Image: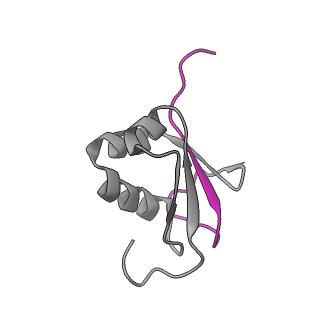
């Protein structure tokens, strides 16, 4: 996200391979953007390993599956990053 981002910060929680790639279980990120913008911000912080996970991940925003990666995220939302899980 760029310096024009507005809104309350987001809380980003990582699970499984996303947590391993980020190196942290949770962090905050600037609000005011879309999921694509958030992914770009997070990949810039943590590198190509997390970027790869983010491309394949599913996301929950305040507990609801979020499919439109270009839609604005709600201010102050909690975003869960869920990589593909093995098994059934």
Residue 61 horizontal/vertical position (percent): 65, 55
Q: In the picture, residue 77 is in which quadrant?
A: bottom right
64, above or below 74, in the image: above
Residue at 54% x, 25% y is: 85
Q: Is residue 55 visible in this depiction of the protein?
A: no
Looking at this view, name the residue that lies furthest to the front: 24
Pick the front one: 65 or 13: 13
Quadrant occupied by the C terminus = top right
The dominant secondary structure in magenta is loop
Decide if residue 50 is on the left or right side of residue 57. left
Q: In the picture, residue 3 is in which quadrant?
A: bottom left
Question: Is 20 part of what is drawn in magenta?
Answer: no
Decide if residue 88 is on the left or right side of residue 32. right
Question: Is 76 part of what is drawn in magenta?
Answer: yes
Looking at this view, name the residue that lies furthest to the left: 48
Residue at 60% x, 76% y is: 8
32, above or below 88, in the image: below
Quadrant occupied by the N terminus = bottom left
Residue 24 horizontal/vertical position (percent): 46, 46
Q: Is residue 31 visible in this depiction of the protein?
A: yes
Residue at 28% x, 49% y is: 47
| Extent of the magenta region | 67-88
Looking at this view, name the residue that lies furthest to the top: 87
């Amino acid at each position: 996200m760029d310096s024009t981002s507005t809104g309350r910060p987001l809380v980003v929680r990582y699970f499984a391979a996303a947590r391993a790639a980020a190196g942290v279980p949770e962090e905050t990120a600037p609000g005011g953007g879309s999921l694509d913008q958030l992914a770009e911000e997070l990949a810039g912080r943590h590198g190509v390993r997390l970027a790869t996970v983010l491309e394949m991940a599913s996301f929950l925003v305040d507990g609801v599956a979020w499919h439109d990666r270009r839609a604005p995220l709600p201010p102050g939302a909690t975003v869960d990053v869920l990589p593909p899980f093995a098994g059934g």
